[in-house]
Amino acid sequence: MSFPRDFTWGAATAAYQIEGAAKLDGRGESIWDRFCNTPGKVANGDTGDRACDHYHRWPEDLDLMAALGVRAYRFSIAWPRIQPDGRGPANRKGLDFYRALVEGMLERGISPLATLYHWDLPQRLQDDGGWASREVVDRFVEYAALVFDGLGDLVDTWITHNEPWVTAFLGYGYGVKAPGVADWPQALAAAHHVLLSHGRAVNAFRDEGGRGEIGITLDLTHVTGEPEAARRLDGHRNRWFLDPVLRGGYPADLVELYEERVGPLEFVQPGDLEEIAAPIDFLGVNFYQPAVVRPSSVDGPLALEQVPSDGPLTAMGWTVEPTSLTSLLVRLKRDYGDVPLVITENGASYDDPVPDGQAVIEDPERVAYLRGHIEAVERAVAAGVDVRGYYVWSLLDNFEWEHGYDRRFGIVAVDFENLERTPKRSALWYRDLIAQHSEGS
Ligand code: IFM
């Protein structure tokens, strides 16, 4: 494969999925703590209380990355560690944890990429309406300013939000993720408030003379199928987020659909769209699978359904089709111009052998998945798309949200009994790939 020499090779995680230490050093309750403790919401009643215990084992995890030659680490900051109730001054111990973590990265030559919000809203803010309430926007900007102030001398690449579609529609529309609300008017309001808080945080970062670069990560997909249904799903999943961030307006076809089938978008106030379109330095793209759709009367306002794939699937039941990643990246350049792109997540869950003293865990399907998708990125780069980096999801097996610990995405296995880490073949494969594509090699 051929990639630019300065291409960033990274690994990604998120706070609630790996840190554990849920009650330590002043951390407040998040919506995921509450959701996990609500019977029936998460497989096996699993919680993030201990997770990978990265809160204590982070030096070992950074050593692992350094040994693999991983150049950049995308991690997220737990809002309830910084502001236990979602407002007020920073909790010093929370900031200290992330300062130590980032200093540890820098000592090992690993560049930090910090995500401000990866779904762990302080529960106290959910009690006031969460992302469906406009008040949360000010809270997020206050939190962002505390983090910029507390870590800005160490971190120079920031992501405001991870996957606003998931926050809004899986959290407030379909109700399968925290806070578990199933109400489309709230989901649409939540999506808008997430986007507005993104734009305002970007502006605050610039106004405060923030060093480095800032962007947002969207989970995007490549949609095909019956043309009308495909256009609708593309609008819902992709354009509803891309258009306001990169073009300053919501797509007219979806505005019409939502107003007709969900209700008036009265949460959009004058000036909001200008704020949401604050210029970003890069767009983070999380990609896992394409979507093939057809019309249906069952799926609420969108009136469509996924066509089951007859190709290979991951343990999540997700379609493996790498060429759709090339198509998505080429389309982003065609429709949205030359915004630099970073693949901030890509990876796969498989039913790997259970860690049992092996030196390496064999995971041939994950190796094939990663190879296929990295080749797909390479093809997009060769076609002239400005892709700057790739972060594998995930460094470690971790808490996969409503699926608990049943779904393993790591290139490094975690034994959740004794918390031992064991590299999988995919980690060694990734190590060799990075070595072949490093500056000076
Ligand atoms: O584990 C998640 C991550 O938190 C966000 N993107 C998708 C991953 C796999 O489901």
Image (cartoon, helix red, strand yellow):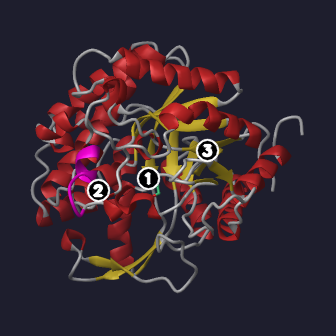
Q: If you read the primary sequence from the N terminus, does the residue marked by circle 3 or circle 1 appear first?
A: 3
Asked if the residues shown at circle 1 and circle 2 are in contact, with their CB atoms under 8 angstroms apart, the answer is: no
Q: If you read the primary sequence from the N terminus, does the residue marked by circle 3 or circle 2 appear first?
A: 3
| Distance from mark 2 CB to nearest ligand 1 atom below 8 Å | no
- The one nearer the camera, 116 or 250, is 116
Q: Is residue 65 magenta?
A: no
Q: Which residues are magenta?
A: 33-40
The spot of residue 396 in percent (x, y) is 57, 49
Q: Which mark is in front, 3 or 1?
A: 1
- The one nearer the camera, 135 or 146, is 146
Element type at mark 1: loop
- Residue beneath disc 3: 11
Element type at mark 3: strand
Give the residue type at disc 2: Lys
Distance CA(mark 3)–CA(mark 1): 16 Å
Residue in the image at 22% along x and 17% along y: 88
Q: Is residue 262 left or right of residue 384?
A: left
Report the disc number at residue 177.
2
Tell me the quarter of the image containing the C terminus.
top right
Give the residue type at disc 3: Ala
Image quarter where ligand 1 lies: bottom left
Distance CA(mark 3)–CA(mark 2): 24 Å
Element type at mark 2: loop
- Residue beneath disc 1: 399
Distance CA(mark 1)–CA(mark 2): 13 Å
Q: Residues within 10 Å of mark 1 (few under 14, many from 20)?
A: many
Q: Residues within 10 Å of mark 2 (few under 14, many from 20)?
A: many
Q: Is residue 244 above or below residue 378?
A: above
